[in-house]
Every structure is written in C-alpha cells, then in structure tokens.
Image: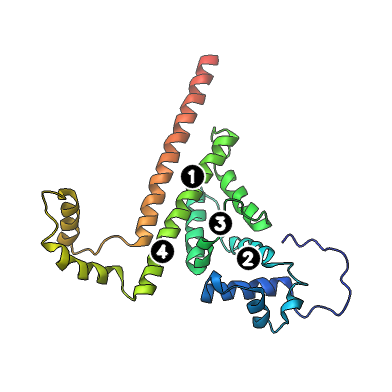
Amino acid sequence: MWGVSGPGRRGPKPSRTVEEVVAAAIALADAEGLSALSMRRVAEALKLSPMSLYTYVPSKAELMDLMLDHVAGEVPLPGGGDWRSQIEQQARGRWAMAQRHPWLMQVGMHRPPLGPHVLEAAEAALRAIDGLGLSELEMDQLTSIVGDYVRGAIRAALDAREVERLTQMSDEEWWALSQPLLKDLVDPNRYPTIVRVGEAYKAIQHKGPSLEQNFEFGLQRVLDGIAAFIAERQRAITARGAAAG
C-alpha cells in the first residue's frame, strides 16, 4: 500500500503490477458489486492463475484495503479557500467518488486502511479547521461529524439507486402509482402536515428535491452548525484575552 519493497522476489519477473491487480478488482466491483469480487475472478480478468495472484496480494482482505485506499485517492484534495470551502470540496468529492463506486457502502469503515491516500484525506480535513481556536479533540470530532453525515447521505442515495434497479421503477413512477391508492385513505385531519407539504410540491409542479439536492442542503446545515461552534469558541478566546488584559 505504501510502496515499500519487501525481500527480493525470486523467479521470473512478474507480468503484472500490484496497481494493475487493484485496478482490475475495482473494475469488477464497479461492474458487478462486491459480492462478485474474488481472487479467482480478479485473476481471470488479468489472465493469471488464481494461485499466482497471491504473489501480488496475500489475500482478499489486503486487496480490499488496497482498493479502498486507491479510490480515496480519487478525491481531489482541497485547492484552497476558507475552512468551509475546503470541507465542501472534500465532501462533494467523496459524494462523486461513491457514485462511481457504490460497493463502498458495503465495506465497514470504522477502522479504515491506514494507507497514504486515506491519511492524506484525513490530514486535509483536519488542516482545514486548524488554527480556528479549536482543541485537537474538537477538530477530530468535527471532521468525524462531517464524515458521518456524508457517508449517511451517500448510503441513502445508493439505497435509492438500488431500489430503482431492483424494481425497474423510478421514485416518480412509484409515487404516481401510490397517490391514487392513498387519495381516499389519507385523512387531512389526521396527517395535516404531510398533506400540506405534498400540496406545496403540487402547487409548484415540483416532483421533490433530488438526492443530490438533499445532500447539498444537509451539508450546508452541518457546516452551519460547525460555523456556530467555531464562532462560539473564538468569542470565548477573545473574552479570556480581554479579561487577562
């Protein structure tokens, strides 16, 4: 993962590279899902024998770590701007990356692979809010809040995509079929708020916010909360300075 060479390898020169193995595994998971990923299938894609693949990667577990670190490197690091702009850039990059690799949501990330790309992303997130009056623990907690929100929003979007794939029906088509059934069952006196919201969408002939719009709206509200927390910390620092002076 880190490109550190191990003991010298005896025998003929490898016909493939670890990078090619990882790329083949990612392509397979993108096309068929994580359930299709196996060392045998990756070996077939590379025209290698299954046993020879183990000379590149010790097991499927290590292969998964390499895949996760590789796709983490697809997210561009923030190109400047204030703390909020930098975090927005990373969040949107993660959203776009997950749309390309939906299998990511099937992988537990409580203990992510500690590869160079994963750590670069974590460093960039922490650096964005460094120097704003936060403690190191607060910086870590705030970046975790953003990460948790982004991951949840991605999961909701990918779940919606999977439901549409399995049912061969869009959300709009599902609502169109459901509305006639509910028309005589939904009592406005019992569900007044639901009815009012639905009527509001009808009035503007709007089919409802898209998943990406929901993601953006939620991201801004999370960042609003972080901004308020940072402002509170900075006011406290100013007050302590004035009292000491």
Q: For the C terminus, give its image quadrant.
A: top right
Residue 83 placement, left or right of 167: right
Spatial separation of the CA atoms under disc 2 and disc 4 = 21 Å
Q: Answer yes or no: do the residues labelled 2 and 1 have beta carbons within 8 Å?
A: no
Spatial separation of the CA atoms under disc 2 and disc 1 = 24 Å
The image shows residue 138, relative to residue 194, as above or below, that is: above
Q: Sequence-wise, which precedes: disc 1 or disc 4?
A: 1
Judging by the rendered image, the residue that carries numbered circle 1 is 145
The image shows residue 2, relative to residue 23, as above or below, that is: above
Tag 2: residue type?
Met
Q: x, y percentage for residue 149?
A: 45, 50
Q: x, y percentage for residue 57?
A: 73, 68
Question: Disc 2 or disc 3, which is closer to the eye?
Answer: 3
Foreground pick, 97 / 45: 45
Judging by the rendered image, the residue that carries numbered circle 4 is 159
Spatial separation of the CA atoms under disc 2 and disc 3 = 13 Å
Q: x, y percentage for residue 177?
A: 21, 71
Q: Answer yes or no: do the residues labelled 2 and 4 have beta carbons within 8 Å?
A: no
Judging by the rendered image, the residue that carries numbered circle 3 is 108
Judging by the rendered image, the residue that carries numbered circle 2 is 67
